[in-house]
Amino acid sequence: MTLKPMLHIHISPGNKKDGRCEYLLFEVKIRAIPAQMRMAYRGMHTMHFELRNLRHFVALINHRSFVLAAHSVNLSQPAFSRSIQALEHQVGCELVHREKKGLPPTQQGKVLLDYANEILRKSDELTFRIAAFNSNAQSVLNFGCGPVAAASIVPKAIAKLLQNHPHAKTRFVVDKWNELSLKLNRGEIDFFISNTLYFEDDKNHQIVPLAPRKWCLYAHAEHPVFKETPNRYNILKYPIGCTLGVRELLSSYLSEPDYIPSLLCENGYSIMDISLNSHTIGCSALLPMIEDNIKKRLLRVIEPSDFQGAQQDRNILNGIISLKGTMTTPLRQTFIQLLQDYDQVPH
């Protein structure tokens, strides 16, 4: 018989410093173990982790320097070192190789880092959602968006919103559409901005449309594809990097429903960088930076001679997606109007 230890979450107040209250986040307890199995767990003890120690450990891994990490969390280096030592004492092992350049994490440190990032993310999310209940829920925005919106209209709309409503609380996550859909259904976000292709016939969702965004094929200006008339056949001679939201549109153009590109990536800017530095043909939304590089003649748009689709086939339909029947607050209505206003501005 295989038994899995039970993980129990225990939250209790810790030290209050600089107006912030840290918490002892969790303790691990082994329960319900039959007598014949107790020997296997002898010597195991309850571990208490403080959020501040986990934050300090993540800062150390990010900065790879005790001095820089201590500065980033506004601590003296001796106090920061004591925090890391306390965490190592709790887990019973070293978490970084101090004798190696760059302070790489030990194997135990790598395991702890994965959990620490997840715990801190959940802690921040919990703090935000509790604050939403404790304050005026009408002044809270909790939403998600894809990388394109995060790099274009969302920052502009949030900047204007906070200028007009400085006490509003705002939190947004950037992820691919399927993960955002899961977060929406779990109640982790209230709405998200993404390609509406997968939600148009879904009776459980409502969509506020945004302006369609063109997608295109492009390559660096000296790409050999431009030495002949671009068409479907000579395009396929080269690797193609494509964003997730455009893959089906590209497959339709290629008349290959199951086409899988050489690179599939959610971030169109990553594909653009790869295209600038290789013979990979990019396929994504026509992002502002791509347009800038086209104007600088670093990139060229590929206009295939055998493209037979109607003009709307070259568009990505974007929108604001939420569950039907959810409450619309005045702040959300204001923010959606700002998104629509900025979306109409030429990119």
Image (cartoon, helix red, strand yellow):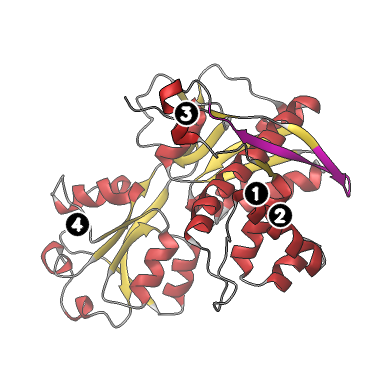
In depth, the one of 228 and 245 nearer the eye is 245
Q: Earlier in the sequence, mark 4 or mark 2?
A: 2
Q: Earlier in the sequence, mark 3 or mark 2?
A: 3
Question: Which residue is the site of mark 2?
Answer: 86
Mark 2 is surrounded, within 10 Å at the Cα level, by few (under 14), some (14 to 19) or many (20 or more) other residues, namely some
Query: Which mark, residue 111?
Result: none
For the residues labelled 3 and 4, the Cα–Cα distance comes to 69 Å
Please name which of the two marks, 3 or 2, marks the residue nearer to the observer.
3
Q: Secondary structure at mark 3?
A: helix
Question: Which residue is the site of mark 3?
Answer: 38
Q: Secondary structure at mark 4?
A: loop
Report x, y in % for residue 234: 13, 69
For the residues labelled 4 and 1, the Cα–Cα distance comes to 63 Å
Evaluate if marks 1 and 2 touch, with contact meaning CB atoms under 8 Å apart: yes
For the residues labelled 1 and 3, the Cα–Cα distance comes to 22 Å
Q: Secondary structure at mark 2?
A: helix
